[in-house]
Amino acid sequence: MTVESLPKHYLVRTQVEDLLADLSEGDAVPAERELAARYGVSRETVRQALQELLVAGRVERRGRGTVVARPKLVQPLSLGSYTEGTLSQGRVPGRFLVRWEEIDAHAKLAEILEIGLGDMVIHLERVLLADGERIGLESTYLPRRRFPDLAETFDPGTSLYAWIRARGVAFTTATERIETALPTPREAALVESSTAMPMIKLHRVSRDADGVPIERVRSLYRGDRMAFVTELR
Amino acid sequence: MTVESLPKHYLVRTQVEDLLADLSEGDAVPAERELAARYGVSRETVRQALQELLVAGRVERRGRGTVVARPKLVQPLSLGSYTEGTLSQGRVPGRFLVRWEEIDAHAKLAEILEIGLGDMVIHLERVLLADGERIGLESTYLPRRRFPDLAETFDPGTSLYAWIRARGVAFTTATERIETALPTPREAALVESSTAMPMIKLHRVSRDADGVPIERVRSLYRGDRMAFVTELR
DNA sequence: TAGTGGTCTAGACCACTTT
DNA sequence: AAGTGGTCTAGACCACTAT
């Protein structure tokens, strides 16, 4: 890509950004066909410009039409639970279960959790909510041997972190990998987004005071709706 | 987006992924027009599928044609310098200056750096390299009063972190914000990427032992080429 | 029912790179 | 010169939603 001769979709993007400056959160953005006519470009070019503004979190699709987006939500990247992190930002946390299964540990999972190959692993997948909005998807893998009564006593609508801690297990360290990723159609549907919307993917392995892995978590957050903060020491 | 009836571009994406499984790093991927003919779809549909694989870091554009991508580079998200982080991953770090300016601090910057409104700030922008590959863009803002001889004694091709530390300033804490973002055409060109490629944007304020801000850094890393790891305690 | 965004097509022209 | 990806167009059909 050269610096000279800016692409049309980028020019449309900056023009629409000027429109947004005069609008408020939740206000309707002109329709794609209307913008195409106004700027003398094809609808596909407008769509590319809007896609960039969607990824940037400036606008969002809302039922019928496009509206000015709310600011991104911010989450601390910390050892604490999703519940605590969300509450600390003044948001109401929520979650609901979309999958619960008990599987044989394959080689990689067994290695990560430091369990035997073929040991049973509990996998729970939950949609994460902030103020009722779907903002992410969380997959947790736990060794069943360590938490045999999880299925009977844990309510998937509540904090797993709190449940584990209440059983005397201390979260002491965690390794986390952070990158961008695109969702599958299923994942996109679960968070009410699209396959073209980049997500923030987090891979975490949490350990107890003895350095023993407690859980492996894979989280997928909507890149247009979430940002993370962390304190480095 | 509904779960049923998968979009064609996603089906093409999975079919191309199957192709990639039989190829090695650097091998050529069939041309877009060839893939369109092979799968009986339009070229634009193939392009959407390839765009998803580009974002995922599975393929990359290379001169003429598309090839199987190398694995993502991994950087620690730590207080240390880019040089140290890159070396710790067994990569050769590099950087070159693309902008040097001294500006009056505007309100927000003055607040962040805890300096007077209108105090002079040094802004340097550098392209970051790993093994010679352009992987990111870094903008650093420093109060000139604290580093008056920066222009005379600092070589922008070297580690700024090391230069500051050598002057007896200790990096003690930092606050970092992490999110996805799209580059402007200029930024995309500098890292040899495109405006449609999601980047990982980092905002950092580093502080010394007294809690005084040392610098503000805004980094933009190619999302298709970089991942980050951090240790949580 | 009318309007919206989501998807897909067939084709065009361009800049660039390799042969 | 030939082939590649980058951009853009004009149009089509669809599912969904607000009226």
Image (cartoon, coloured by chain):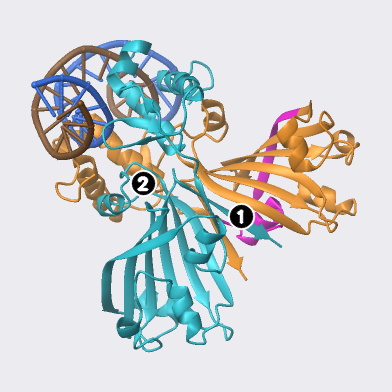
Chain colours: A orange, B cyan, C brown, D blue
User: Which residue is under mark 1?
Assistant: A91
Question: Which residue occupies 57% across, 86% down?
Answer: B210
Q: Secondary structure at mark 1?
A: loop
Specify the subunit that label 2 lies on.
A
Would you say residue B207 is visible in this rendering?
Answer: yes
Q: Nearer the viewer, residue B188 or A24?
A: B188
Q: CA–CA distance between discs 1 and 2?
A: 22 Å
Q: Is residue B118 visible?
A: no
Residue beneath the point at 79% across and 33% down: A122
Q: Which badge, 1 or 2, is on the more N-terminal residue?
A: 2
Q: Is residue D3 above or below residue D6?
A: above
Query: Residue at image x 74%, y 42%?
Result: A112
Disc 1, disc 2: CB below 8 Å?
Answer: no
Name which residue type carries label 1: Arg
Q: Residue at 52% of width from left, 60% of height from top?
A: B87
Query: As displayed, is residue D14 above or below residue A225?
Result: above
Q: Name the spot of residue A204 as percent of width and height, x first.
A: 67, 48
Q: Position of residue A166 (x, y in %)?
A: 87, 53
Image quarter for residue A7? top left
**Is residue A98 shown in magenta?**
yes
Q: Amino acid at mark 2?
A: Asp
Q: Which residues are magenta?
A: A75-100
Q: In the shown orientation, is residue B101 left or right of residue A231?
A: left
Relative to B144, does residue C11 appear above or below in the rendering? Answer: above
Identify the chain of the residue marked 1, using the numbered disc in the image: A
Residue A27: numbered disc: 2
Q: Is residue A178 left or right of residue B63?
A: right
Q: Which quarter shows the C terminus of chain B? A: bottom right
